[in-house]
Image (spheres, rainbow, N blue to C red):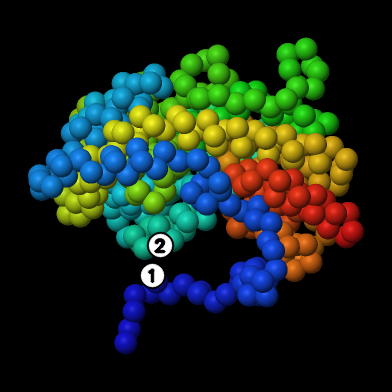
């Protein structure tokens, strides 16, 4: 039997995966500092309200709309209105995930062999999404200088005749920084006739202050150490971040992606969307073609579309719990690192992750395996997100506070022991 070359992946077990499997099989405890599934992190869900939303009798009628039910799209528009962005329901397409949203956009924008420029470090799932669609991902670099910044010259150098789009995650995963180069990105897209694809799944999870890893603490306006705090992210200048790319004028064709996996901490419900913006003629053509793509699949089921409005309305309660957890874990991280100078963390502004710098005495994978085998701690090695070189670890701020602090202490002990 012959299979497509696009699915010819290396499916062998990595050393890290094997170490985790063997530890679990032995019945030994694991402090999981990679947790990304909020439904398994001890948060309190409104179970009755979430499930009741699925009982809407209107879901019993089949009335397919390629863009999704109008009522659900209007709920998405209200979400953006609360963040300072005016979005028309006709600009919105519902999908079952942001992964499917990327798939739709790759089909819309790219022929086989065309290229999409993707910020790196970033989430590794993009590689599979692009390969399945016969699209080539070309990484463009971030650099860290008192915060993460896009190497705009490096980005421009990577544009070729096959480039069709530039993709960013805002705020980025896992670096947790805001994309402040919007004007520059739009200018490059306009110059070369490219689309801008912006993934905003972590938009609502910002920290109230810039959290500089200086002496292990953020600093207030007087320069004194202060606790890290958080709040709901809105598109206002006083919250210290650029807000959604859905807001403001759009000088190039722009697609903004998000969904309730992060917004409402409901990854199992499979509800996301694309919001499209741009010049009228260009946007009209994009919407017409995207409608055909969406109509081919009609993938989102009716009960979820009917429930979307209620789930978005209840999202703030979950966000407050998650922000409280990530703030507490970031505070614990800084407190532990304050007495272990060999391990430092990079500035983080938003999201669920923190990036650690450790001495590059060996491969990141070797350290991650050793942490599992000798310390019972699971972390992401830097290469998992495309970090250049060694000396990088990524930890999730989502897990229970006690486990997180204990895990960070074990990391520091392991690094100190060499």
Q: Which mark is residue 131?
A: 2
Q: Quadrant of residue 20?
A: bottom right
Q: Residue at x 89, y 59 (%)?
A: 417
Q: Residues within 10 Å of mark 1 (few under 14, many from 20)?
A: few
Q: Residue at x 54, y 34 (%)?
A: 321
- In the rendered image, which quarter contains the N terminus? bottom left
Q: Residue at x 63, y 75 (%)?
A: 25
Question: Of callouts 1 and 2, which one flags the residue occurring earlier in the amino acid sequence?
Answer: 1
Q: Is residue 313 above or below residue 93?
A: above
Q: Residue 194's spot in the image, x, y percent?
A: 36, 39
Compare residues 210 and 277 and report the one nearer the observer. Answer: 210
Labels 1 & 2 near each other (Cβ < 8 A): yes
Compare residues 187 and 407 and report the one nearer the observer. Answer: 407
Compare residues 79 and 406 and report the one nearer the observer. Answer: 406
Asked which secondary structure carries label 2, the reply is helix
Q: Residue furthest front?
A: 48
Asked which secondary structure carries label 1, the reply is helix
Q: Which residue is mark 1?
A: 6
Q: Residue 317's spot in the image, x, y percent?
A: 47, 31
Q: Is residue 90 above or below residue 94?
A: above
Q: Is residue 160 above or below residue 220?
A: below
- In the rendered image, which quarter contains the C terminus? bottom right
Q: Which mark is residue 220?
A: none
Q: Residue 47's spot in the image, x, y percent?
A: 39, 43
Task: Judge left or right: residue 247 versus residue 401.
Answer: left
Note whether residue 147 is visible: yes
Q: CA distance from mark 1 to mark 2?
A: 6 Å
Q: Quadrant of residue 92?
A: top left
Q: Residue at x 40, y 57 (%)?
A: 130
């Amino acid at each position: 039997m012959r299979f497509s070359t696009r699915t010819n992946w290396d499916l062998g077990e990595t050393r890290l995966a094997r170490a985790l499997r063997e530890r679990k099989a032995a019945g030994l405890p694991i402090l999981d500092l990679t947790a990304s599934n909020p439904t398994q992190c001890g948060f309190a869900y409104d179970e009755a309200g979430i499930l009741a939303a699925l009982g809407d009798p209107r879901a019993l009628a089949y009335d397919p709309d390629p863009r999704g039910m109008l009522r659900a799209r209007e709920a998405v528009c209200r979400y953006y209105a609360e963040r300072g962005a005016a979005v028309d329901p006709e600009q919105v397409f519902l999908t079952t995930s942001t992964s499917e949203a990327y798939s739709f956009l790759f089909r819309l924008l790219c022929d086989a062999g065309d290229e999409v420029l993707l910020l790196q470090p970033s989430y590794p799932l993009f590689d599979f999404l692009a390969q399945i669609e016969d699209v080539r991902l070309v990484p463009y670099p971030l650099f860290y200088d008192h915060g993460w910044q896009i190497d705009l010259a490096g980005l421009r150098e990577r544009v070729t005749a096959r480039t069709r789009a530039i993709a960013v995650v805002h705020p980025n995963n896992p670096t947790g920084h805001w994309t402040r180069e919007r004007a520059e990105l739009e200018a490059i897209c306009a110059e070369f006739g490219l689309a801008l694809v912006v993934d905003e799944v972590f938009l609502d999870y910002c920290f109230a202050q810039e959290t500089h890893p200086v002496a292990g603490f953020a600093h207030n306006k007087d320069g004194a150490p202060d606790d890290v705090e958080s709040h709901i992210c809105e598109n206002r200048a006083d919250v210290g971040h650029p807000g959604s790319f859905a807001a403001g004028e759009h000088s190039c064709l722009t697609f903004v992606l998000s969904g309730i996996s992060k917004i409402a901490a409901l990854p199992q419900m499979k509800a996301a969307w694309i919001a499209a913006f741009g010049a009228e003629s260009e946007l009209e053509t994009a919407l017409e073609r995207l409608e055909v793509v969406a109509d081919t699949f009609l993938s989102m089921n009716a009960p979820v579309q009917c429930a979307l409005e209620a789930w978005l309305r209840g999202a703030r309660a979950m966000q407050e719990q998650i922000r409280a957890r990530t703030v507490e874990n970031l505070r614990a991280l800084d407190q532990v690192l304050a007495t272990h100078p060999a391990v430092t963390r990079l500035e983080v502004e938003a999201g669920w992750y923190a990036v650690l710098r450790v001495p590059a005495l060996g491969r990141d994978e070797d350290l991650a395996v050793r942490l599992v085998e000798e310390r019972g701690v699971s972390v992401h090695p830097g290469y998992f997100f495309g970090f250049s070189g060694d000396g990088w670890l990524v930890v999730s701020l989502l897990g229970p506070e006690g486990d997180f602090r204990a895990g960070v202490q074990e990391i520091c002990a392991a690094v100190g022991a060499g």
